Structures are given as C-alpha cells and as structure tokens.
Image (tube, rainbow, N blue to C red):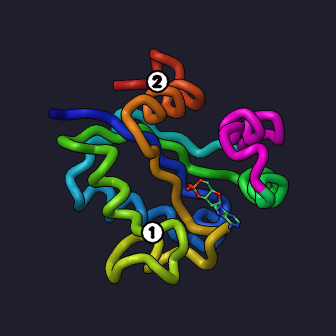
Amino acid sequence: TTNRTFTMIKPDGVENGHTGAILEKINAAGFRIVALKKTQMTKADAETFYAVHNERPFFGELVEFMTRGPIVAAILEKENAVEDFRTLIGATNPADAAEGTIRKLYATSMGENAVHGSDSNENATIEGNFHFSGREQF
Ligand code: CMP
C-alpha cells in the first residue's frame, strides 16, 4: 500500500552541499514529494522532535547538532515508503551502511549522519505534521 514517510537532510548534509544529490537519489528511487522546505529548528523544536531520545547520553549533542544550521524537511510518498526509505538511507552509523546508500555516500559519523527517516507509519505522520501544516501537504 502507498504510504508516507518524513525525512530531513540534517545540518551536516546541507552544510556539505549534498542537498541536490540527496534529493536526486530520493527522486530516482521513486518517491513523490508531498511537501518540501528549507528551515532551521529551534532548540525547543529539536527537544520536542527528539523527545523519545531525551534520556540518552547523546541527547544534548543531538539537539546542538540539529539546531546549528538549516535543514531540508520533506514528506515523501511511495509504495512501502517508510521501509524503502530506511533501506535507501542505510544504517544509522555510516560505517555500517550498505554501499550506495545515502548515509554511506554522504554521512560523516553516527551523530552527523546526513539524513533522518521515520521508523514507522505512525511516527511519519507525527513528524510530518510537526514540520508542515495541512495546507503545505500535496
Ligand atoms: P536518527 O536515527 O535520524 O535519529 C536519532 C539520532 O540520534 C540519530 O539519527 C543520530 O543522528 C543520533 N544518534 C544516535 N546514536 C548516537 C550516538 N551514539 N551518538 C551520537 N548521536 C547519535
């Protein structure tokens, strides 16, 4: 069934000039862009978005990183979008990511791993609606 996922090109991916290449890979993999924008998260935004990780030792570092510069946020639609997008981006740690995946190509470390991908349909909806109003989703 067709469903949606949510992604962000993280500050490292934008800073390193990989926005165009990453969007091209997303397009080539057959995802339809439902919503797209360049934006920057505030500290409060990042703390809310990553609330599920707030007990983790890397939480402070994650919030600092995600707020240090602009991101590109998008909602994507495709058959089996959540799972197929996670395959396209590869493992969280780029050292473990498969050849040809976005993280293998563009991530620098476990923390600065170039892209986000929702881990479930439920979280895709929550995350997409965090960044985009209903009038921004087509
Ligand atoms: P993501 O899976 O998109 O969302 C949670 C993020 O936390 C993850 O990407 C990494 O950017 C970050 N993260 C996960 N594990 C670590 C870690 N051990 N050290 C630093 N950052 C991490």
- Queried on whether the Cβ of the residue with tag 2 lies below 8 angstroms from ligand 1, the answer reads no
* As drawn, 69 above or below 6: below
Q: Position of residue 12 (x, y in %)?
A: 65, 67
Mark number for residue 18? none
Name the residue furthest front.
55
What residue is shown with label 1?
Answer: 91
Report crowding for label 1: few under 14, some 14 to 19, many 20 or more residues within 10 A (C-alpha): some
Q: Position of residue 39 (x, y in %)?
A: 65, 42
The residue shown at (53%, 44%) is 73
Amino acid type at circle 2 is Glu
Residues tagged 1 and 2 counted as in contact (Cβ below 8 A):
no
- Queried on whether the Cβ of the residue with tag 1 lies below 8 angstroms from ligand 1, the answer reads no
Query: Which quadrant: the C terminus?
Result: top left
- The one of 77 and 80 positioned closer to us in this rendering: 80
Q: Main secondary structure of the magenta part?
A: helix
Q: Position of residue 58 (x, y in %)?
A: 77, 60
- The one of 5 and 70 positioned closer to us in this rendering: 5
The image quarter containing residue 57 is bottom right
- Magenta stretch: give its range: 41-56
The residue shown at (46%, 79%) is 96
Front label number (1 vs 2): 1
Report crowding for label 2: few under 14, some 14 to 19, many 20 or more residues within 10 A (C-alpha): few
Mark number for residue 136? 2
Disc 1 secondary structure class: loop
The residue shown at (47%, 47%) is 7
The residue shown at (44%, 27%) is 125
